[in-house]
Amino acid sequence: MHKNKSHSELDKLKTNLEFSLKQSMKNIDSYTHVRGESLYVDDVNVREGTFYAVVFDSPKAHGKIKSIDYSEAEALEGVERIFTYKDIPGDNQIGGIIPDEPLFAEDEVHFWGMPIALVVAKSELIARQARRLIKIDIEELPVITTAKEAKEKDSFINAPRSFNLGNTEKAFHDCEYIYEGETFSNGQEQLYIEAQGSYAEPLENGNIKITSSTQGPTAVQKTTAKVLGLPMHKIEVDVTRLGGGFGGKEDQATPWAVMAALATYHLKQSVKLILNRHDDLRMTGKRHPYESNYKIGLSKDLKILAYEVEFLQNSGASADLSPAIAERTLFHATNSYFVQNVKSTVYSCKTNLPPNTAFRGFGGPQGMFVIESAIAKAASELGVAARQIQEANLLQENDVFSYGQIAKQVEAQNSWDAAKAIFNIEELEQKVEDFNKNNAAFKKGLALMPITFGISFTNTPMNHARALVHIYLDGSVGISTAAVEMGQGVNTKMLQIAAKIFAVNTSKVKIETTNTTRVANTSPSAASSTADLNGKALLKACNSLLDRLKIVASEVLNVSKDSIELKDEFVYCNSEKTTMSWTELISTAMLKRIALTENAHYATPEIHFDKTKEKGHPFAYHVFGTSITIVTVDCTRGTYEFDAVKVVHDYGKSMSEGIDLGQAEGGLVQGMGWMTMEEIAYDTNGRLLSNALSTYKVPDVFSVAKNIEILPLETLGNDMAILKSKAVGEPPLMYGIGAYFAIQNAIKAFNPNYKHKFHAPMTPEKVLISLYNK
Ligand code: LUZ
Ligand code: MOS
């Protein structure tokens, strides 16, 4: 914002923004974001006497707790109390899918950073000082940090799962070429800008209100109730917005909220618990690292006839969302390709790392990386371009996925062809080849990456949402849904829906906080499905109200209901503007004692999945697209820069082009970061080495491609998507996988003896070693 712009000018800008209910509507949060007025958990007005808490966590990755001495910490001036598992009135259990995770460690610790106690004091500073005075004696036990080691020791979260199609064993007999190999993809830190945190306050009658930075308000409510031994109705959870989630707050926002509530329960006072960056990095789980092995068989004309893959997921010390993430890995194991014979298995391996958790893509990217590696390996062995193999196997209409769903409205070939044509792939490839011929110290590489991503929670029962709409008697509108705004722009989309149905200016619509007393029993904002599920519920609620209002207008005007239409805040009759405004319509409805509140429920139709057969139709639809990535590697230093990433993406009929483009760009860059520079490192004792932003590097403006071009694919959209505007949160992340293979190709151009390696991220160190590896 320009400093010299007056408030009134800014307000005018805001009004203009509100009036532009166009496809390109701005994110409604942009106004308060740039003014620093957007509210996060840390901005909640704390009440007089509020306490501050920090978490005391395990300084070892695995062991028996011999003794803990809290006496010095407790004696520190300003320390109110230290809570442990002994203070829990209900269950010391926060596991969502599998009950295998205590809120506080009891006799054993299972990862470095595992919460043991909560130190509550008059200030955060005092609480931190007190934490340092706690003495703990741990008898160390063997530490497992890798999935492979866990598998060797039979250390699993649950039983493995397999999706199978056809008969791979038989199909391998018919293959002209067969390749096998191993891959590794590392974890990834969500790195939301707003760290984990919550604020709990006591209400009357032992009720507790929690303000939480969570993607899943109901998960927080349910788990808090369980740990405190209270019915859910005594716990209210409120969320204004998150400073980023990326999956990291789907499940792992919960413990901090429960801890704050536990302290509030005992102290009858407000308690604020906000992790600082170091605590957050050390205590929370990340994207799952995967160690995998594959076997791929091709025919002479490069058709993939058989594909076998075994995924070892590094789940960490407890289940968290690992089983669901493992499942999505299987769903996306063949990415955008049709493979007739598939055998895929995933093992959730129990290790002594923090429980790994949801991260944009939710196991899908890990699955896709392996088949892209298998294709790259085959291509390099056969001396063909990977894109020939990719192209020969693209998913077509009515192809079947390994999980039994028949592919419909498939845009894999369409987006691939569009990307090739629009960006002129032959010319791009020629330029790379010419450059490589004429340069010894720098080499370019190019890679295509098609994506196919299934939309819906893979767990069918989670695919539902509700919306609550009030029209107030002055014609202004208040909307509550289960959608959590985390920067993805879902509130803007909700507002667009209501404004569109009621034909009112967007300034007439307010999106309320996400609150469990207004919308209950919700699924988290996740799985790219938030706008679809909540938007459809909202659409239903608004349409019911609209229907009611049309009856009111038709009675007053003495015409048929079907002749009534709302437009520009006026009632229209047979396309003619009447004198009755929206506001008059609402006051008339009030006089007629018509309900101006509506609650609607939406559950995705058609989807189902049978886990006993591992077959079904789990996804409402799929999102498609293709990226082309071009990189230049500095062959003296091993560093690289991305020249361009060019994408054709299937938005369906985007209802919000600016927001969707933002999601696509952000996802892409986050995927590139995962594949190239973001390197999670634990030592063999299970201690996080990349424990600060100085040792964990995410893409910045300098490491993003110089030229990112994301063009919409012209498609019909999908009726299961909100207003035919397809889900956009996660799919674009997987375009970033192309970055890995572009670098591989550049290395190969420099070092012809190079054998492709599939060990992500491809950091400059690894590039340098690869360039000179004979
Ligand atoms: N969360 C979840 C997700 O619980 N189920 C899913 O299928 C999913 N997919 C993507 C991201 N989060
Ligand atoms: Mo997510 S990975 O949609 O919370």
Image (cartoon, helix red, strand yellow):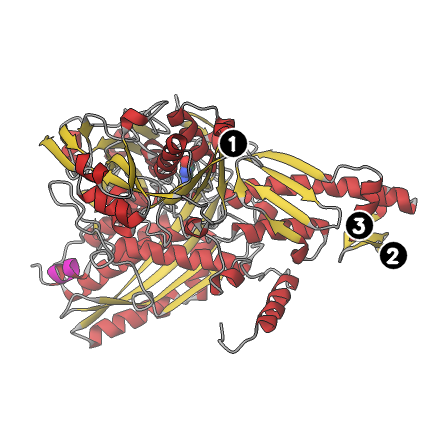
Percent of width and height locating residue 324: 36, 33
Query: Is 768 included in the stretch rendered in magenta?
Result: yes
Q: Which element is circle 2 on?
A: strand
The mark lying in front, picked from 2 and 1, is 1
Q: Which element is circle 1 on?
A: helix
Segment colored magenta: 765-769
Report, in whole angstroms, how far the alpha carbon at label 2 lies from the one at label 1. 49 Å
Point out the residue furthest to the left here: 774
Q: Nearer the viewer, residue 166 or 415?
A: 415
Residue 694 shows up from this direction: yes
The mark lying in front, picked from 2 and 3, is 2
Residue 521 shows up from this direction: no
Label 2: how many residues lie within 10 Å, few (<14), some (14-19) or many (20+)?
Answer: few
Query: Is 713 included in the stretch rendered in magenta?
Result: no
Where is 32 relative to 719, above or below? below
Which residue is identified by label 1? 204
Which residue is identified by label 2? 579
Which residue is identified by label 3? 565
Question: Of the residues shown, which amino acid type is indicated by label 3?
Answer: Glu
Please identify the quadrant where the C terminus is shown.
Answer: bottom left
Residue drawn 20% across and 36% down?
Answer: 111
